[in-house]
Amino acid sequence: MVETENFSGQRNTGQIAGHELVGHRLVGGMPSQALVNMWLRITSKIVKYGFAIEYRDLEPPRTGIFDGLRLTLDPDVDFEMQCFILLHLFGHSVQWVAPSLAEQLGPLQNTTERETFMKVLHDYEYGAARFGMQLLHEAGIRDFDQWYADFVVTDWQYLERYYREGAIPPWRECVATDQPLIRPESIPPLEHKQMEVRFAF
């Protein structure tokens, strides 16, 4: 899930322990060597798409940020979660720097009616997920499709609960398994540009 940097002041996270927000969110418990192999391939592809990747100490509940030029992760986040966040941030970065997708961002920024906004947000999140799946396949990784689909649905359920309940829910209560696979979508031409920082939590 991704929010603008300046939205953070509206969150009520004071009673949530930091270890519940950063570094302890797992879905599949994928073997470490398989994750390392995936990490090496997806980082290579992301760099080839023109984005820098960096680590930075981020203030909880942020787990990653993007600004149109780079994807930044907090190193305290569990490695499996880092792999998903990187794919997630890549997908959202594509949405914000691809000229052909610019019009799709309007409803996300301008819709105020709650149920309509939730549908717009759902489409935005799953649009990013499809670009992440495309990157996985372009990197030659086709045995992580179920893992990725489960993470995407888990992430959406986590975000949806936050918006409906007004508080960050326990991650483990949102974990989903055996979800329908995500359909990949071709990555359009990109025009990298500095933009307002947005973050995942």
Image (cartoon, helix red, strand yellow):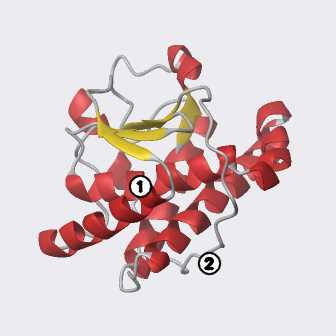
Q: Decide: is 79 above or below 166.
A: below
Spatial CA distance of label 2 from label 1 is 23 Å
Identify the amino acid type marked 1: Val
Identify the amino acid type marked 2: Arg
Instruction: Residue at the far bottom: name it.
Output: 143
Q: Is residue 147 visible?
A: yes
For mark 1, what is the residue? 47
Which of pointers 2 and 1 lies earlier in the amino acid sequence? 1
Position of 134 with respect to 85 (left or right) is right
Residue drawn at x 54%, y 27% is 197
Q: Can residue 200 be seen in this view?
A: no
Can you tell which of label 2 and label 1 is closer to the viewer?
1
Q: Where is residue 23 in the image (x, y as percent from the top left)?
A: 23, 43
Q: How crowded is mark 1: few (under 14 residues within 10 Å), some or many (20 or more)?
A: few
Q: Position of residue 137 (x, y in %)?
A: 47, 79
Q: Which quadrant holds residue 196? A: top right
